[in-house]
Image (tube, rainbow, N blue to C red):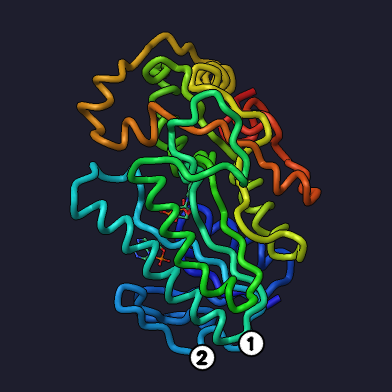
Amino acid sequence: MKVVVAGSSGLIGTALVAALRRDGHEVTRLVRRPANARDEFRWDPARADLDERALRGADAVVNLCGAGIGRRRWNGSYKQELRDSRIVPTDVLASAAAAAGVRTLVNASGVHYYGGDSGDRIVTETSPAGTGFLAGLCRDWEAAAQPAADAGVRTILLRSAVVLARHGGMLGMLYPLYFLGLGGRLGSGRQYVPWISLDDEVGAILFALTDDALSGPVNMVGPAPVTNAEFTRALGRALHRPTPLMVPAFALRVTVGEFADEGILHGPRAIPTALEDAGYSFRHPTIGAALAATVGRS
Ligand SMILES: NC(=O)c1ccc[n+]([C@@H]2O[C@H](COP(=O)([O-])OP(=O)(O)OC[C@H]3O[C@@H](n4cnc5c(N)ncnc54)[C@H](OP(=O)(O)O)[C@@H]3O)[C@@H](O)[C@H]2O)c1
């Protein structure tokens, strides 16, 4: 396949591009700086500027754009940046994919589509959107891809959980603390922490690109959901470190702000119904297996 990838320099994009090339696919990376390699094509998503030649002859587009959700404390202008950096590029790529006759669009979204208010209830792709800033963002982000689906492009919406990688994302931040024996549960520990290994995130994107039966929202989550307390114990076990601490909810709210409630103290108990129904086989089906492969010490 010829695959065009936007947001290719990030955690998922870097691993995905490597895997696509390993499997013999041709990759073009859309970059927001001047292009300086033959596989790069410059675009300016903030100005909705994409040369129509960028998608010419492409079989698929994968859009992984977005400013970091937990990277800065949320204020009005950062929330706007979180929205603009996802919804505008999606809008541009969905229209361009439709116009270019691309067969498949794989677009990032997040499992926080379901919000944090679902408690212990299991959520699948047919569950309704939740409430809160992140849920609203995911809903509008997915809606921006709709013009592609309306034009007959097979459109897949990746409702991704926390992607577990040693060198980035949430685990990249927690790893040094746990390594020093400073790990512990966050708040009550009863909230769910949706997770997926980076290998499975990439594996499931490759699967989605090639399995024509899959379309629409896809929960990108490991098949065995865990609570924060279970996640904490599993990470301690993988690193052979104690996890004696507990960070109270109020301390998280003071230090992290609004993201504490939406991204840390609440999380949906999501399961990967669409992937499992389509026959995707998880490389890391449990949190123990995912953490052992990612940060495990023997
Ligand atoms: N990692 C996770 O745990 C996780 C979980 C749920 C959802 N997701 C979503 O999946 C997507 C990819 O995740 P990731 O972890 O690979 O993210 P990442 O490492 O933060 O990379 C995102 C990429 O988006 C592009 N980008 C950054 N700021 C931008 C802006 N203002 N406007 C347009 N593009 C911008 C950059 O690529 P270029 O510089 O190459 O343009 C960046 O490398 C994101 O949308 C993220 O929200 C990730």
Mark 2 = which residue? Answer: 53
Judge by depth and name the residue closer to the eye, 215 or 48: 215
Query: Residue 50, image x and y in percent?
Result: 42, 83
Residues under numbered marks 1 and 2 in contact, where contact means CB atoms less than 8 Å apart: no
Judge by depth and name the residue closer to the eye, 57 or 145: 145
What kind of residue is marked 1? Gly
Mark 1 = which residue? Answer: 57
Can see residue 146? yes
Residue beneath the point at 51% across and 85% down: 54
Q: In this view, does 2 lie above or below 176?
A: below
Q: Is residue 269 above or below residue 246?
A: below
- Tag count: 2
Instruction: Quarter of the image for the N terminus: give it.
Output: bottom right
What kind of residue is marked 2? Arg
Choose top left, top right, bottom left or bottom right for residue 283: top right
Query: Residue 87, image x and y in percent?
Result: 39, 64
Choose top left, top right, bottom left or bottom right for residue 184: top left
Query: Residue 251, image x and y in percent?
Result: 24, 21
Query: Residue 252, image x and y in percent?
Result: 28, 25
Can see residue 167? no
Q: In this view, does 31 lie above or below 283?
A: below
Residue beneath the point at 54% across and 62% down: 107
